[in-house]
Amino acid sequence: MSDECCDPAPAVTVPGRPQIALAGNPNVGKTTLFNALTGSSAKVSNYPGITVERRTGELKLPTCTADLHDLPGTYSLNARSAEEQITLDALTGLHGDKAPDAVIVCVDATQLARSGYLLLQCRELGARSVVALTMVDEAGSAAPDPKALSRLIGREVVAVTARTGRGLEELRAAVDRALRAERRSDWVWTPSPALRASLDAVKEALPAEWRSQQRLGVDLPGSDDAIALWALTCIDSGEEADELVGVPATLRAAVEARHAGKDVDDESVLGRWHWLDREVDKLIHKTPDRSLTQKIDRVLLHRAAGFAAFLGVMALLFMALFTGAQPLIDLVDHFFKWIGAELRGVLGAGIFTDFIVDGVIAGVGAVMVFLPQILMLFLFLGFLEDCGYLARVAYLMDRIMRSMNLHGRAFVPMLFGFACAVPAITATRTMERRRDRILTMMVVPLMTCSARLPVYTLIIGALIRGSRVTQSLLMVGMYAFSVTTSLAAAWVMSKTVKPLKAKRLPFIIELPPYRWPRVPDVLRMMWGKSSMFLREAGTVILGCSIALWALLYFPRELPKGSPDYAALIEKAPSAEQKAELAAEEQAAHLEASYGGRLGHAIEPALSPLGFDWKIGVGLIGAFAAREVFISTLGIVYAVGGDADEQSQPLRTHLQRHYTPLTGLSLMIFFALAMQCMSTLAVVRRESRSWRWPAFLFGYMTVLAWVVSCLVYQGGRLLGFG
Amino acid sequence: MSSSLAEIALGRSARVARVDGPRAFRRRLLEMGLVPGTEVKVVTVAPLGDPLRIEIRGGQWSLRRKEAAQIAVEL
């Protein structure tokens, strides 16, 4: 029974578990439908080599169980970039994965013609397709009759309302039937003789695995024509080179030989649209009611009120992330410290205990501490995205962001950068193009994150003597400095770094109607993305934490001639003296550690900035998180690892050793340097390469060194310090 | 009378006459339904003067002024 549709039934070969793809435009309720169809079986992962999320779940059909793949939303299958290629590949089986056995195409009842365009392309490719007519409730009496639409396109059409579950069973049954249908390639327009000749010539150059016989298991000339048309349309060289990967050179040459251009685009695109305009008009008798969206937009996109509302929403978001998450962060922090302390009590002193407590447990804590902000971020972003406001943020901010060659949506990650670069970088996913995402990732770490704050507080408090007003102004100045440098860096990189240069693609963003987000969808997305963060970035952060701990811990041998601290502590008369000696021992161990030696080794490179080896060790420790600079410095100066930015003994030590000019140079260094392994780990994950975190680390370190050096040496020339 | 989409008055309807510009840019706009003959309207301008909010086929889009200038329309 269960394998009935999996049998090699007459005329169809669907071996193994059927693979079904879910395709559709953005904003047509595709994800809601996916969640409704797959329930809790959905898994979120990434397409290899690229940060486009891949959702797969189990689809129960009347006669068998299939896998359902949610494809990235797209308006067309004419892919030119690596991201767009995913949908094309997933539908056609051009690279790696085999072509799906059937495709559910979401068609928006309120945008019939536009979503019909994608459907026409799927039909040309020879997909066994079923139409899920979504947004029927929203369209109301303006919705087309599913039966009439079905007659028109020759595919089954099921009206669904995922919210209430209406139509889901019919859709499952229709997919089940489609799996048994023969593949057909249907074209609503006929290529001209000239295009026909080009198609035939390009078809000859298609590699065997790109032909329908191998992709679909059946010879379907129309499907091969569709692939040839895609090649003629999208493969380009020179000025307008495409970014497609895995296109065989012979095919590229065959396409170039035809000199296809705008006339091919016109013929195919207009061919489909003329048919849609003619036929779809017959099915629709009314336009859907959009008065509510219009009313809301009159306020939210208003010149003054809209801007005020936008600032309000962003302030709320920022407060939630900056202050709202703090109690939870503290809770996580205390929890791991508590576990560590308890374990230390149970295990007793020793290297193994230190490894478990200071290495592993503290490392897990370093990952988990991000979770409150990440969860909150995805909750808010999911809500804003699903209700339609995020698209409007891009509309409102485009003018400012574009002047720095950033995407309008980069505003949100840049703002979050004030709280923490790690969630901010995960928020770059709301941008579709890789170039926009990477450029944003490269500049977000320059924003003054909350971990820099205690460092600035310590330095200003200890080294910058002056009135409270001067000190506050300096703090504000550091924020202004970070905004200026990150915007300037974006502009410079977009002009100089080749993969980050702006592309001439239209910045056309749909402003979808406002809709109430579905809570289960938002929560599911929040959980899926957060758990992926833990899995992928978390493991790297944990590994780095342990490595950093080892660097500052081993080899556990003090140089010859060091005092015997154990004996001295034993003999010390008072508890105070015992604590002092313990702190001194800790400081001696840190200086003798590999990290301490590294601090000494880099001292010549740091002295032009006014730093000594002690600050060098602090900088190494700060890789765990910038505020760790303070506790590391606390250990170096033997005031203990629990020193915070308000610690008076630490401030006294700093005043004794450093000048205000060194303080300023150090603050500049902290503002510009890539002192955070978690940021590097998350950039590694989001960019799917080691190249970008390496570039980020390199450029920020060089920038920090040069500017700090200029400040310090310039200051000395002017007679300061 | 013909002009570009960047020039027409707010709220005034026009018809797309021609889409110019580089190939990929142009095809993207055509595929979204901005084909010749389509009715198009500029609804509002963003607070900072750019981009434009345009309406085509019952849907609204954000489009930069510079890009709208590539779309020739007839009033």
Image (cartoon, rainbow, N blue to C red):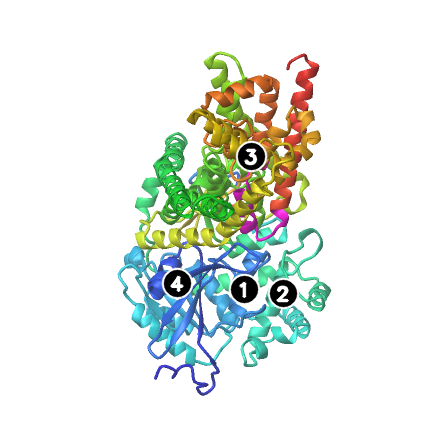
**Chain part drawn in magenta:** A673-692
Where residue A354 appears, as percent x and y from the top left, is 49, 44
The residue wearing badge 4 is A42
Whether labels 4 and 1 belong to a single chain: the reply is yes
Splitting the image into 4 quarters, where does residue A576 fall? top left
Task: State the CA–CA distance, disc 1 to disc 3.
Answer: 37 Å
Circle 1 packing at 10 Å, graded few (<14), some (14-19), many (20+), is many
Q: Nearer the viewer, mark 2 or mark 1?
A: 1
Q: Earlier in the sequence, mark 3 or mark 4?
A: 4
Q: Residue at x 40, y 60 (%)?
A: A112
* Tag shown at residue A446: 3
Read off the chain for label 3: A
Task: State the CA–CA distance, disc 2 to disc 1.
Answer: 12 Å
- Residue A678 on the magenta segment: yes
Q: Earlier in the sequence, mark 1 or mark 3?
A: 1
Q: Earlier in the sequence, mark 4 or mark 2?
A: 4
Q: Secondary structure at mark 1?
A: helix
Whether labels 2 and 3 belong to a single chain: the reply is yes
| Type of amino acid at the residue the image marks with label 1 | Leu
Task: State the CA–CA distance, disc 2 to disc 3.
Answer: 41 Å
Task: State the CA–CA distance, disc 3 to disc 4.
Answer: 36 Å
| Type of amino acid at the residue the image marks with label 4 | Ala
Where residue A509 appears, as percent x and y from the top left, is 48, 47
Whether labels 2 and 1 belong to a single chain: the reply is yes
Q: Residue at x 32, y 40 (%)?
A: A295
Q: Are marks 4 and 2 in contact (CB under 8 Å)?
A: no
Is A178 on the left or on the right of B50, as rendered?
Answer: left
| Type of amino acid at the residue the image marks with label 2 | Ala
Read off the chain for label 1: A
